[in-house]
């Protein structure tokens, strides 16, 4: 047994912990760029609460609220311009995975000039970033627990992760109470994303004992609580467990990486800007059905957690979960056409090759096309 494990995340987890926003931000700067979405944190009152907490600590602020559901590289540059104009020296992210990812990349680009895509594809290297404090309001991406920032280049439609320890948050404040305002459809989508993170890390070729333990526990929490929370969002005990599973999912992919479902989904949402969790819902059962024989033991473990007894049931059980979450969807229903398949398969091999290689079954280009066709 031979492995490395290095994930220097600082998690502040628990109900009511969002009251510590001002204290944490003040440790790292005097003027914060608040990165958030267009409406949700305003409607929920979180933005006003955060501003009040910053003022208590005498931290000034600017607001950047232009982040999309699949954040663009061009949006990152807009955020960097505000930093240049206003002198912000710390970033506070309030929102879901897209908000946190954008905030992390803004922090990075403010210290590493030029085309961020060159850093994403490894053409250039950067080691610095502004300090960030992340406050997730959805329980899905787990971006608060890793060094990834997923961006879409609007010109090429490439959707790929910036990966560098420079963007690991100085503090991630994870307050399950902030998740209670999520609409059911969003809860289903992000919750399934969290399950995929844990499943993919569990079967990953780069997995190791510590990630397997965390991923197994994350899957257990989700299998027991996700549908329960979907049916009753006021069940805070269950929501707390789903939230923890989401953070665990982010942590395990930070070490073990994602596999084929994420690899094939990124070209879909890069091309059509679809909701990430819906793209995963369309693809994951098909991929699992074509994969389980390559790791009967681990897919068997997943099947048992989902209520079955053997790996061969895994795809069927995932489909049942999707039905329970009203998330059963096809790529065709998301707007994907047959004529898109060749581009998506080629793009998958371009932007997601590490994820394809990390999967228990290494799919060929033709097999990837077949998966896309089957998911239509």
Image (cartoon, helix red, strand yellow):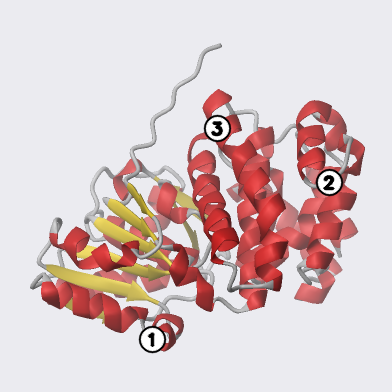
The answer to whether 186 is drawn above or below residue 291 in the figure is below
Of labels 1 and 2, earlier in sequence is 1
The quarter holding residue 358 reads: top right
Residue, x 29% and y 55% (percent of image)?
108
The answer to whether 356 is drawn above or below residue 113 in the figure is above
Residue, x 34% and y 42% (percent of image)?
165
The answer to whether 118 is drawn above or below residue 300 in the figure is below
Q: Which mark is residue 42?
A: 1
Instruction: Kindly check if marks 1 and 3 are in contact, taking CB atoms under 8 A apart as contact.
Output: no
Circle 2 is placed at which residue position? 307
Residue 311 vs residue 151: left or right? right
Circle 3 is placed at which residue position? 211
Residue 226 vs residue 292: left or right? left
Q: Is residue 64 visible?
A: no
The quarter holding residue 234 reads: bottom right
**Residue 240 location in percent, x, y?**
52, 58
The answer to whether 253 is drawn above or below residue 144 in the figure is above
The quadrant of the picture occupied by the N terminus is top right
The quarter holding residue 344 reads: bottom right
């Amino acid at each position: 047994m031979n492995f490395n494990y290095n994930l220097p995340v600082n998690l502040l987890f628990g109900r009511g912990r969002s009251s510590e926003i001002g204290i944490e931000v003040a440790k790292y700067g005097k003027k914060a760029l608040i990165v958030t979405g267009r409406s949700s944190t305003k409607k929920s009152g979180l933005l006003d609460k955060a501003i009040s907490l910053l003022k208590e600590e005498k931290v000034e602020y600017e607001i950047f609220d232009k982040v999309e559901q699949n954040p663009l590289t061009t949006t990152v540059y807009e955020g960097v311009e505000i930093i240049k104009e206003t002198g912000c020296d710390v970033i506070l992210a309030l929102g879901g995975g897209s908000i946190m990812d954008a905030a992390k990349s803004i922090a990075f680009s403010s210290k590493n000039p030029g085309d961020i895509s060159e850093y994403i594809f490894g053409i250039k290297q950067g080691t610095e970033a502004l300090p960030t404090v992340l406050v997730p309001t959805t329980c899905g991406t787990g971006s608060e627990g890793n060094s990834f920032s997923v961006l879409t280049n609007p010109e090429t439609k490439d959707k790929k992760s910036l990966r560098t320890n420079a963007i690991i948050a100085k503090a991630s404040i994870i307050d399950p109470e902030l998740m209670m305002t999520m609409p059911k459809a969003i809860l289903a989508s992000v919750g399934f994303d969290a399950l995929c993170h844990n499943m993919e890390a569990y079967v990953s070729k780069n997995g190791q004992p510590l990630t397997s333990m965390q991923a197994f526990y994350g899957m257990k929490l989700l299998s027991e609580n996700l549908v329960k929370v979907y049916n009753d969002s006021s069940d805070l005990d269950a929501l707390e467990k789903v939230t923890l599973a989401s953070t665990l999912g982010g942590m395990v992919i930070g070490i073990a990486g994602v596999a084929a479902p994420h690899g094939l989904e990124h070209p879909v949402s890069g091309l059509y800007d679809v909701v990430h969790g819906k793209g995963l819902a369309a693809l994951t059962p098909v991929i699992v059905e074509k994969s389980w024989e390559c790791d009967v033991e681990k897919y068997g473990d997943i099947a048992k957690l989902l209520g079955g007894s053997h790996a061969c049931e895994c795809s069927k059980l995932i489909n049942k979960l999707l039905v329970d979450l009203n998330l059963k969807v096809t790529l065709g229903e998301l707007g994907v056409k047959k004529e898109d398949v060749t581009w998506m398969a080629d793009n998958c091999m371009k932007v997601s090759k590490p994820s394809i290689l990390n999967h228990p079954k290494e799919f060929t280009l033709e097999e990837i096309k077949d998966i896309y066709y089957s998911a239509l």
